[in-house]
Image (cartoon, rainbow, N blue to C red):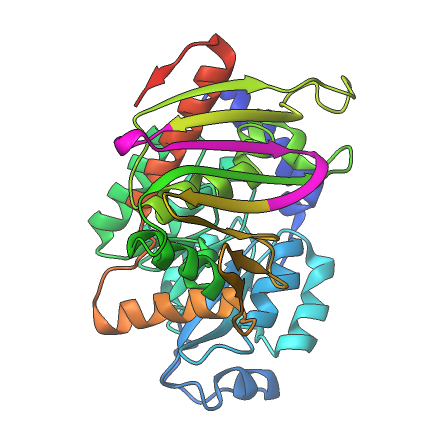
Amino acid sequence: MKYHSSSKSTRRKFLYNLGLTTLSLPALSSLYACSGKPSGKKEQSVNDGKKDKLGIALVGLGSYAGGQLAPALQQTEHCYLAGIVTGTPSKIPEWQEKYSIPDKNIYSYENFDSIRDNKDIDIVYVVLPNSMHAEYTIRAAQAGKHVICEKPMAITVEDCNRMIDACNKAGKMLSIGYRLHFEPYNLEMVRLAQEKEFGALKKMSSAFGIHTSPGIWRLNKELAGGGPLMDVGIYCVQAFCYVSGMEPLAVTAKEGPKTDLEKFKEVEESLTWQFEFPNSLVAEGMCSYSESICNLRAEAEQGWFQLEPAYYYGGLKGETSKGKINFPQVNQQARQMDDFALAIKNNRPSPVPGEMGRRDVKLLQAIYEAMQTGKRITL
């Protein structure tokens, strides 16, 4: 985020409303080393049988952390849920009871930096509102932890640069939460395009829309950085790049009409855009906060292939001009986090690094510029 005084004020107010500034937890001490014998039942259960796994701490216990990441960490083979960082004390008992997290692995946002002394935690997963990604990624790296940051990586390219620089300086890996790079149906779309099973790509299209409720932080521009483009439109942007294997050369965009001026007073309700890629490939994208839609289609010289739904956590379906695409459903988040743990263990790059996240933020900002100016923006 940009550190203007107004931004700081908004962030402080947001944290206060969540109860972050009032959290009081037991003091955390570096005396609790993972090599020492745990003193309580919860400490024994959290480390039992996990000596070869990397510990992950979730920063932010919203619906994605609670509904997807924490359950996925019960299915991972190379990492496990070691700790949590929260500003809502009332959530702590439930998480401790459900996941056997010891007191020493629970942090507030105020004492977050002391996570550096906790050897149980190898990776910090930042699952906060978009405007907070940069701050907590940088603080995690400075605390000596590897980082997974949820998408979008940040609100500005400048923040992305700061995040990458901080992780490089600390000698820690940075990965973005792009789960679909580990999902069979989306990987098949990549294979079909790259192997030119239906010839060269001629056109792509994708749309992702969901219904939102008034008052959520995603409708606050300072916290979210924008509307559905930042939240669900980024999936379409990502898909255009990973299926084609290319980056766009130019973009035009148009904001859709607003059906609720109060609800969408700060962000767009919907928008459409068109990417121009090399080889005359055109990709048309659409995203919305007032329509349920989720698809990805590629048209080639000798046929087509598509997913609908394309980006959900499960239940994906695929088809080509030759027939159905069928794969077993997988836990996308478990695969994503296991891959990052293996990348750290094997000292190999992540397939979804910070540089990819920075590229996508650049593309998102170009779409907004095209939407606001009505001009064709060269990339």
Within the image, what quadrant is residue 259 found in? top right
- Looking at the image, can residue 19 be seen? yes
Q: Main secondary structure of the magenta part?
A: strand
Q: Assess whether residue 289 is covered by the magenta stretch.
A: yes
User: Which residue is found at the position 29% from the left and 26% from the top?
Assistant: 249
Query: On screen, 279 above or below 378?
Result: below
Picture coordinates of residue 69, whole percent (x, y): 56, 64
Could you tell me residue 185's position as x and y percent?
49, 62
**What range is drawn magenta here?**
276-294
Is residue 374 shown above or below 47?
above
Question: Residue 121 placed where, x, y %?
Answer: 41, 69
Residue displayed at 45% across by 26% down: 274
Above or below residue 329? Residue 187 is: above
Instruction: Give the total of numbered labels.
Output: 0
Q: Is residue 228 left or right of residue 135?
A: right
Pick the residue in front: 364 or 148: 364
Q: Quadrant of the N terminus?
A: top left
- Quarter of the figure with the C terminus: top left
In magenta segment, residue 173: no
Closest to the observer, 12 or 345: 345
Res 378 → quadrant: top left
User: How far across and down, in percent of the image, does residue 195 sit?
Assistant: 29, 57
Which residue is depicted at the point 49% across and 86% down?
A: 38
Residue at horizontal 57 percent and vertical 41 percent from the top: 232
| Residue 2 appears in the picture as rendered | no
Residue 346 located left or right of residue 175:
left
